[in-house]
Amino acid sequence: MDLLRTPDLVGNRAQDILLPAKAAFIAASIAVALAFNLLPWQDVRVVPDLLALVLTFWCVHQPRKMGIGLPWVLGLVMDASNGVLFGQHALAYAVLAFAAQSLHRRILRFTLWRQALHVLVLLLGSQVLMVLARMATGGTYPGLSYFVGSVLAAALWPLVTYILLLPQRRPVVDETTPI
Amino acid sequence: MEHAPPQFFHRGPAPVARLTFFALLSVLLMVLDARFRYAEPLRQVIAVAVYPIQQLAIAPVSAVTGAREFFTTQTQLRRENAALRTEKLKEAPELLELDSLRAENEQLRQLLDARAKLPAGEAIFAEIVYAGRDPFSRKFIIDKGSQQGVKPGQPVIHTNGVLGQVTRVQPLLAEVTLITDKDHAIPVQVLRNGLRGVAFGSGDGSTLELRHMAANAEVEQGDMLVTSGLDGIYPSGLPVARVIKVERDASYAFAKISCLPVAGTDQFRQVLVLANMATSPAWGDAAEGPVKRTPKAKLRHKAE
């Protein structure tokens, strides 16, 4: 379970000092999440928005490498390819990125499942924004099942954290490791 | 100012300022898209750029579907073949009759000096790529676009009946709005007695509403609604929906009539995109007097 524990700010252990995240890896993970979102889902309501989750992850773990512009552009891509109101996902992702970046110090102090609760609130908030935007422009209310995707996505947070932190972990830690 | 942070730590505008900028930009885009439809070119550019990623994502799924089709057992095929043969045989007399009826119809029309019915244009066969992408509306995406000659406004049908209408076209994909969408209206008539009306999507995602019918209008539960062809978009006589509930309340001028569409997207993948009836004469022909914006024309405008 050591891998699943986040660093205590006071008592850092050697294996918890991570290597810097590679920009290429960040880009690749975002591309995979985007491809997942673009799969031909028959009912998108019960599908977790993996792109939002991965963007939240990088905003929390690498706030300096993720601006608000990239999430915004990816939101536009989602809007264009889903054929929904243009700017809906862009707004939601921009706000999501901003909130995640502002809260990143706080979120990282918690254990993974408590982090997931924070992420759930962030994802639900972004969905509420989209619902408001659509209702204002004459859309139909999709029902509470619309928010199921966010719950599933938040439940995936520990797994996503584990996978996306793998390349930054040191392969071997022993007495000869300098730090 | 000697205590200002060095350039090294400079990180550009404050996060709140950036958020405000991007949020305002998104709101602007949303307004442009929802009210004026100005975002279409940008949307097309992005959609085309993303198309390869989308195809890459779809590839494994279509490979599985293809493999499943390949391994369809022989017995299944033979059974299907036999069923199709009997069906064809059953329909043969009617088909033979059709030719003579068509000729007779032509003669009668000439006798009545009626304008011959508009010839049916070419239909485009398409497959549904995905449906239910937008929980806020009722739409699906088909695998044919402007490259294959799909144009906005074309009706889309299935063997059961009308599905909807092409509302947005990209080079290789097109978006079809279902007749159950809240913003969709389709002129219909009751098959039993020819009573005309307009059916609107009810917004709950699965039913239609026959609005503005008088409380004593002769519509009964179980009535079949077919397209009336008055809008110049849908050819007449296509099955649309079946009336499932008629509520007559004396305190309202109109009856509340709910209908269930005969064709749904969850049963099949193949659809037919019919050619636009664009060859029809413009509304308000010179011979018929001054150009007037008739309710029909308005309807067509709305449907587009």
Image: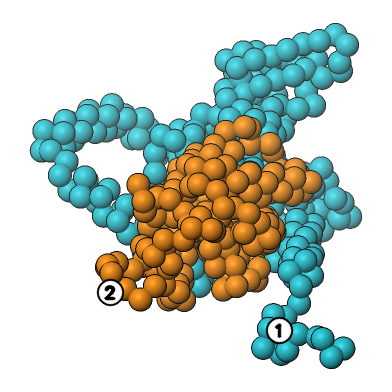
Chain colours: A orange, B cyan
Where residue A104 appears, as percent x and y from the top left, is: 61, 59
The residue at 48%/47% (across/down) is A112
B211 and A12: which is toward the camera: A12
The chain to which mark 2 is attached is A
Q: Which numbered marker is on residue B99?
A: none
* In the rendered image, the vertical position of residue B225 relative to residue B65, given as above or below: above
B100 and B261: which is toward the camera: B261
Which mark is nearer the camera, 1 or 2?
2
Q: Which numbered marker is on residue A176?
A: 2
B89 and A161: which is toward the camera: A161
The chain to which mark 1 is attached is B
**Residue A126 visible somewhere in the drawing:** yes
> Dot 1 corresponds to which residue?
B10
* In the rendered image, the vertical position of residue B261 relative to residue A21, given as above or below: above
Q: Amino acid at mark 1?
A: His
Where residue A101 appears, as percent x and y from the top left, is: 64, 62
Where residue B172 appears, as percent x and y from the top left, is: 47, 65
Secondary structure at numbered mark 2: loop
B8 and B263: which is toward the camera: B8
Give me the C-alpha separation between circle 1 and circle 2: 37 Å
* In the rendered image, the vertical position of residue B31 relative to residue B108, given as above or below: below
Where residue A163 appears, as percent x and y from the top left, is: 37, 57
The residue at 35%/47% (across/down) is A1
Q: Quadrant of the N terminus of chain B?
A: bottom right
Q: Residues within 10 Å of mark 2 (few under 14, many from 20)?
A: few
